Amino acid sequence: MKPQMPTTLVLGAGELGLAVIERLMALKDRHPGLFSVLVRLPTTEAARRTIQSLRNKNVDIVHADLATNTVDDLAATFTNYDTVICCTGFVGGPGTQRKITAAVLKAGVKRYVTWQFGVDYDIIGRGSGQNVWDEQADVRDMLRGQSAINWIIISTGMFTSFLFEPAFGVVDLAKGQVNALASWDYRLTVTTPEDIGRLTAAILAHEPQIQEEVSYIAGDTFTYAQLADMVDIHLGRKIERNLWDNEHLRSEVAANPNDESEVPPCIRAR
């Protein structure tokens, strides 16, 4: 009897989920396996096209709702897989990442890559003013407090695209502005979703297998001042530069107490 092929479930088919599944599929010749993607039932034509594209690549589609399904519901799904990779952020609302982690632990999967792509929550700690960041610290405690499953955290810094999100407020190309948070000398570490997908696949394929640790990867690191210089070069003109000091950042946090995004318009300055 042939040994059973390893099974992998990717949660989410957004920018990161698609990048991860693409790179995993690219390694199939050296690391064969069966791949599935968990998504909600499609409600838009774009979502239906994405699902069909995945099916055309022999990726199995699993339908579930991470926001509304219970821990037991999710665990019943996860138990069919050796590896679960969470590529969905906080769209499910507060508590979703804790719930997913609880379901993974209940299912007893062999390996879990949690949604910790982004800032280093060990450094930030609790009390940052962002409840979802405190939740990420809870997830780390849940994983470190058990020994039944292997876990991997891949810390990447910000997604490069976040810099140009209007809600983030750092680079506003339409207005020709760069806004530095707290200091022009503070540094940003960024990585593109494509590179995160490539390196996530490489980390999972590594031999000997990586066990219960944080893997740090990065595309680039630069100061806010260097970022403004790069935007100058890209636009071919000098852009407006604004420094948002600590007082301004605290006032913005106070004005947006219900902002549960992972990368809010303002980041707490230490």
Image: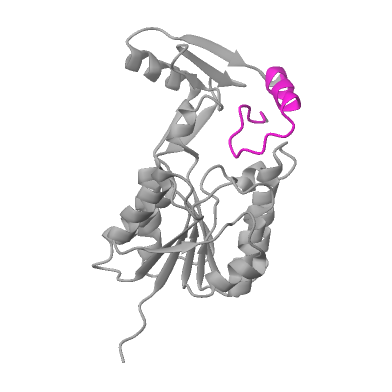
Observer able to see residue 110: yes
Residue 199 is inside the magenta segment: no
Image color mode: one colour
Observer able to see residue 149: no
Name the spot of residue 189 as percent of width and height, x first: 47, 36
Give the quadrant of residue 266.
top right
Image quarter of the N terminus: bottom left
Q: In this view, does 260 lie to the left or right of 110?
A: right
Name the spot of residue 193 as percent of width and height, x first: 40, 43
The vertical placement of 44 against 243, above or below, is below
Q: In this view, does 172 lie to the left or right of 26?
A: right
Which sits in the foreground, 261 or 129?
A: 261
The vertical placement of 252 against 56, above or below, is above
The vertical placement of 151 against 158, above or below, is below
Image quarter of the C terminus: top right
Q: Residue at x 49, y 48 (%)?
A: 43
Q: In this view, does 242 lie to the left or right of 56?
A: right
Which sits in the foreground, 253 or 202?
A: 253
How many numbered badges does the structure rendering display? 0
Q: Which residue is drawn at 63% across and 30% down?
A: 267
Q: Is the magenta stretch mostly helix, strand or loop?
A: loop
Question: For the magenta stretch, what is the residue range?
Answer: 247-269
Residue at the outermost bottom position:
1
Q: Residue at x 45, y 11 (%)?
A: 176
Residue 267 is inside the magenta segment: yes
Name the spot of residue 203 as percent of width and height, x first: 40, 59
Which sits in the foreground, 214 or 258?
A: 258
Give the quadrant of residue 139.
bottom right
Name the spot of residue 118 as percent of width and height, x first: 53, 43
